[in-house]
Amino acid sequence: MILRIHMRGKPVASEVDLRDLARLTAGFSGADLENLMNEAAIFAARRGRGEVKSVDFQDAFDRIVMGPERKSKVLSEEDKELTAYHEAGHAVVSFLLPNTDPVQKVTIIPRGRAGGYVMSLPTDRMAMTQDQFEDQIAMAFGGRASESVFFGRVTTGAAADLQQATKIARAMVMQYGMSRELSLRTFGDQESSIFLGRDMGYGRDYSEDAATSIDEEVSEILDRNYRRAKELVEENRDKLVELAETLMEVETLDRSEFEELMNREQPQTPEMEEAVETAASD
Amino acid sequence: MILRIHMRGKPVASEVDLRDLARLTAGFSGADLENLMNEAAIFAARRGRGEVKSVDFQDAFDRIVMGPERKSKVLSEEDKELTAYHEAGHAVVSFLLPNTDPVQKVTIIPRGRAGGYVMSLPTDRMAMTQDQFEDQIAMAFGGRASESVFFGRVTTGAAADLQQATKIARAMVMQYGMSRELSLRTFGDQESSIFLGRDMGYGRDYSEDAATSIDEEVSEILDRNYRRAKELVEENRDKLVELAETLMEVETLDRSEFEELMNREQPQTPEMEEAVETAASD
Amino acid sequence: MILRIHMRGKPVASEVDLRDLARLTAGFSGADLENLMNEAAIFAARRGRGEVKSVDFQDAFDRIVMGPERKSKVLSEEDKELTAYHEAGHAVVSFLLPNTDPVQKVTIIPRGRAGGYVMSLPTDRMAMTQDQFEDQIAMAFGGRASESVFFGRVTTGAAADLQQATKIARAMVMQYGMSRELSLRTFGDQESSIFLGRDMGYGRDYSEDAATSIDEEVSEILDRNYRRAKELVEENRDKLVELAETLMEVETLDRSEFEELMNREQPQTPEMEEAVETAASD
Amino acid sequence: MILRIHMRGKPVASEVDLRDLARLTAGFSGADLENLMNEAAIFAARRGRGEVKSVDFQDAFDRIVMGPERKSKVLSEEDKELTAYHEAGHAVVSFLLPNTDPVQKVTIIPRGRAGGYVMSLPTDRMAMTQDQFEDQIAMAFGGRASESVFFGRVTTGAAADLQQATKIARAMVMQYGMSRELSLRTFGDQESSIFLGRDMGYGRDYSEDAATSIDEEVSEILDRNYRRAKELVEENRDKLVELAETLMEVETLDRSEFEELMNREQPQTPEMEEAVETAASD
Amino acid sequence: MILRIHMRGKPVASEVDLRDLARLTAGFSGADLENLMNEAAIFAARRGRGEVKSVDFQDAFDRIVMGPERKSKVLSEEDKELTAYHEAGHAVVSFLLPNTDPVQKVTIIPRGRAGGYVMSLPTDRMAMTQDQFEDQIAMAFGGRASESVFFGRVTTGAAADLQQATKIARAMVMQYGMSRELSLRTFGDQESSIFLGRDMGYGRDYSEDAATSIDEEVSEILDRNYRRAKELVEENRDKLVELAETLMEVETLDRSEFEELMNREQPQTPEMEEAVETAASD
Amino acid sequence: MILRIHMRGKPVASEVDLRDLARLTAGFSGADLENLMNEAAIFAARRGRGEVKSVDFQDAFDRIVMGPERKSKVLSEEDKELTAYHEAGHAVVSFLLPNTDPVQKVTIIPRGRAGGYVMSLPTDRMAMTQDQFEDQIAMAFGGRASESVFFGRVTTGAAADLQQATKIARAMVMQYGMSRELSLRTFGDQESSIFLGRDMGYGRDYSEDAATSIDEEVSEILDRNYRRAKELVEENRDKLVELAETLMEVETLDRSEFEELMNREQPQTPEMEEAVETAASD
């Protein structure tokens, strides 16, 4: 394993799970791993430790992939609440769906361009199933669904989620034959795509009628999964409120904290009911 | 805050609200801020002051963003009136809508390419809601609505407003999923757009049927908000006349002057009635 | 005024109206103005005058903008007549319409590519109204309408007029929201146009349905204004014949000569009636 | 006249009509004229003359414009007959139509790519009328119509004529507003055409519906004029046969020989009737 | 004749028909002819002759145009049979059609990319008629028709024939006005084709409706001639079997051998009947 | 045979079938063959042999064509099972179809990008028949059909198969005239394809209607053959389970092992029935 090479002679704590780290850094180049090692060592040093721990690797990973934390950015209470409910939406939907990767972290601390984010740990798998794609789409819609259920309005915050969901749905229909109506074929010329950029009009090797059918299938997939996301949000309002309110307090939950919260018995405190009360439906 | 760095050692008056200035200059580079500081100091010096005040920053900002004032350009009385009613239309509609940024300045002094302009102070927010977009569109249509109501005719002066409104409406439908009929997806390939320019035909990843639906949704959004703008103009004819006539006299109103005028009781002087009388409806 | 700078130390006659000259040369660069001054001085010198007069500036302007006179080109009597009626059509329609600029000169002396031309003095205005655009289109159709009424046939001489009229009508519909049926939006991506040339197919940001509607609106505007031009020509046959016959004799009329002719009582001589008689209708 | 400059000091015969020569060489550059003068002098020298005559200029012109004669190419009797009837078709239709230029020469001697050709002397005119365009189209169809009437079959020999006729018809509809159904406008963006070549798909500034209408109008114009050409050929079979048979004998007729033949009383010899008899109709 | 120049001083046998050679090498450059002369001399030398004969020119020609023989390639008996019936199909259909060039050679020896081929000697003609084009298409379909009749299946061996037939049919409809329904015009901009490659979508100067009509006409022409080819094959089964079986034995037939076989009385041997028996129909 | 040249002086075992090797390496360049020889020698050396055997050539071939084995990649039991049933699907369908090449190897050892693969030995043939293409498509669908029958779900693992099947079906319809409804022609301009990449929109030389028909034919071919593949999988469940389970144990089967397994009497052990039991149907 290439990771071990970069760790050679570095004081890595025994509690660091190399297997998890390998999965997280799948696709990293040697230079990326070198960079990760160095950043993690800096975090450890700042924390007054000679040994690099899991938390240092995690922070180094976040910094490299998502950009530096933007602590200076003081969010308004309103934006903080919006972010908390948005990220809680992703996390709750992901938790409840059977074919998603486990949530590694939920945070509302802005980083790079993102206002907050849910980090998942990808399972090492060879192929994706249709069910996994559909759950990914539903999870991408979780934030928007939560905004819609709790604030009764829609913001630009979900734009990247929308783009991601559309991209998956189009790949399902056009590359993987995972649609109900269209025959089992691929659409679009992959070779020309490499040269000219993805999905450009003149790379079309299908008719306008097929383009219409593709759009209909894509819509069908997206609509179906938005409904699933919204139903999960509505059926788990209490839990989602609990998570969002917790996020507003502590800002970040790691995997064990998140799972503990999701699995514990709902206490139903009066404050919580009130929070649900004030949330609008759309 | 980066602004403070550029102010270090500069005689900035204590009445300057750094927070407002920061919001106004969001997106400015270090060089832009340096430039702003210098221009403001020049304005202060011209005014015989050693201390740089808010007004100096405001004028420096206008000069940098909109270009130099074109005082030499002596507008005809007709053009002056047209500009006054056009800008008053933007300002009144903006003032009356719930989701717009506060008007910072209204002016009919030409600057750069603009015949006049309404400057808004953007609120520091993380995401835009559909309501905010719709109010932005209605505000963009305010000038045209006012021309139509008071002069019964339509000019090229509203071309940039039209373009702006169309751009927002298209983004709502194509990037943010804020349409009524279309399913929750994005349209158009953002990646190829970067390379080839926005919205070019061959970046299309959707069918002609979808293009038709997009056009219908865009039209629906634009028509709805033009109607809103026009109703606001018609229902607030007296106030709009008062603002336009004031602008023809004093040429520029700052935020407090504008808000004072908007909030004061309508006096209903005979001259004003007459002005309303002579205005044509379309 | 920049014009004064270029005139410094030049013997310009006091009768020269600097304001008119400024309007005529709107958009001229410093080098253009320098050139104009020199050419005007040459014309004055040829005419044995030390002082540069209005007529010298006018001739210098024509030479710079339209190219040198082509006196060597001896027109056939038939071509001369066709040109005279064509230009008279433009001039008469322009004179009779309420929203056009005053005619500065009418001539049938070929210059550059043009067989003859009508020069208008643009009024200094900030914005164009729909009425002004429509009158510009009708004026552009004046030449063709006159050919059709008096010769009962259609020539390629009107091609540039047709192109100009189409360009204005398309801008009205696509950029200025001046159509009856289409909603208030812009069509076509201006940004990409800069790079790739105007109106190219792949700059389309609208559907084929919209393209059809645009064509219908453009046709509607053009047809409406051709009818207006033709009605004006038919209702003012006598005056148009008088102007055309005068042009065939004197070749060029300046503004005062043209307006004097247009405003004087129609004498109704027998020769003129005859000319009208022989003219075919289409 | 620029032609005189190139003739200075050259021994040009007094019978040469400079005016005709000027019309023939309209659009020639100085270098072209220099070339023409030299080639004509060579022809004169070959003919043992010191003086350059009309016939020398004509041959020099043909050589420059159409390429060298291909005498070496011995045509089969069948090809010779086909060429003779094809060119006779052009010439007869041109002679009979009111708005065509006079035929200067008819020949079946191959030159460059052409199997034979009819040379017309363009009249010096400023603008083209719709009637002139339609007669040009009908004349272009004359060769094909003759092939069809006399041989009852169609060959590739008319391909260039077809292309020429289509080009004229499209210009009538798209640039000159000479169609019956379409409104008075231009189609296609001329500016982008300069850069990207004429009539390319992405230079389209009109809808698919308009493209269909353009095609219909173009077809209508072409069909109408093919019918005219064919009727003229059918009504003047005897004269056409006379011309074709003469061409097969003498190969080339100049203007006066051609006009003499066209204007003389038809003798109706038995041989000629026979020729008509054997010709098939389509 | 340029051929003679290249033969100067070469020992060419008197039996060589220069006229035939000239027709065969129409379009050859001087260098091509030089090459042909040299290759022919090499073939003669290999055959132990000092004099270059027709057969040497023929082999040299084949080598230059089709590539070297691929003797090493040992065809399976099945492939050999397929090739024999395919080439026999071309040859028989060509022989029976009235407007084709005479068959110069039929061979099943692979050469370059071709598995076998029929070489025709183009007649020296100036123009192609519609009948000649249609017979060329039918001949191109001869191979496929034979495969279908005798083996009841279809292979990729006919791909180049299909492409050739489509190219001719499209040229008939788009360039030569040889269609039944479309009006007499050309389709597609030849000028832009030179620059951008033939038949590319953006060189379209016609509507989608016209494109559909072109496709229908092209299909009509192709279907009609495939039927003709198949009928000829079916009606001449015995002769075709005789030719194919002969080819499998002797591999190559020259013009006289081929014509002798085609013209001789059919012997109807029992073996031949058997061969016909085993051939499937589709 | 070029292969012999590269083997000269190399210690190749007499059991190596040069003919098989030649077919396997059809299309290899001299450098490729050189490379193959060297790699095979390395494999032999590793195995402690001085003589290069068939197995060494096979492994060298796999390494060059598919990339190095990825032994380090430890597949999950689930992925291993999925791969085994996927590859067994290809192999069983290929074995049962009449027009496919014999299976040379089946393996679930990942290599390069592939999770596993079935290697076929192409028969030396000149042309492909429609039946061969259809069987190739059905074989390509074998993996997906097996996933669907045994796991009741669909994964991205079949994406390359889908692309391959679509490519064949499109070539059948567009280049080889192997469709039922479309007339016998080619679609798409091959010449422009060379320059601009395959199947790009602007290389279209056919109408949108034709594009729709092409899509329908392609779908028809694909659907038909997916059904065939699925029926074969369903009808041979026991055999496929036996092969897949064997693959999970031994990872790789060569041609003789595979054929022995396919041809032997099905033993019907209880374990196997159980395996079938647990497999879901879709």
Image: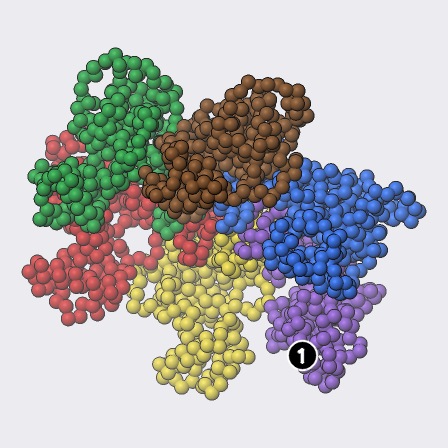
Chain colours: A blue, B purple, C yellow, D red, E green, F brown
Toward the bottom, the furthest residue is: C9
Residue drawn at x 49%, y 34% as measured from the top left: F119
Image coordinates for residue F122, horizontal then vertical, percent: 42, 32
Residue drawn at x 62%, y 50% as measured from the top left: A1
Toward the left, the furthest residue is: D48
Q: Relative to B34, does residue D110 appear above or below in the rendering?
A: above
Q: Relative to A56, does residue F58 appear above or below in the rendering?
A: above
In this orientation, which residue lies closer to the viewer: D57 or A258?
Answer: A258
Image coordinates for residue E253, horizontal then vertical, percent: 21, 28
Quarter of the image with the N terminus of chain C in it: bottom right
Rendering quarter of residue E127: top left
Horizontal side of B232 relative to F160 (left or right) equals right
In this orientation, which residue lies closer to the viewer: A248 or A180?
Answer: A248
Mark yes or no: residue E11 visible: yes
Instruction: Chain letter for mark 1, please.
Output: B
Horizontal side of E162 relative to A245 (left or right) equals left
For mark 1, does the 10 Å Cα neighbourhood hold few (<14), some (14 to 19), or many (20 or more) residues?
some
Mark yes or no: residue B126 visible: no
What residue is disc 1 on? B38
In this orientation, which residue lies closer to the viewer: D23 or F98?
Answer: F98
Horizontal side of A30 relative to E245 (left or right) equals right
Image coordinates for residue F20, horizontal then vertical, percent: 40, 33
Q: Relative to A250, does residue C9 appear above or below in the rendering?
A: below
Residue drawn at x 43%, y 77% as measured from the top left: C35
Toward the top, the furthest residue is: E270
Q: Relative to F156, does residue B59 appear above or below in the rendering?
A: below
Amino acid, disc 1: Asn
Mark 1, secondary structure of its residue: helix
Image coordinates for residue D80, horizontal then vertical, percent: 17, 40
Residue drawn at x 32%, y 30% as measured from the top left: E75
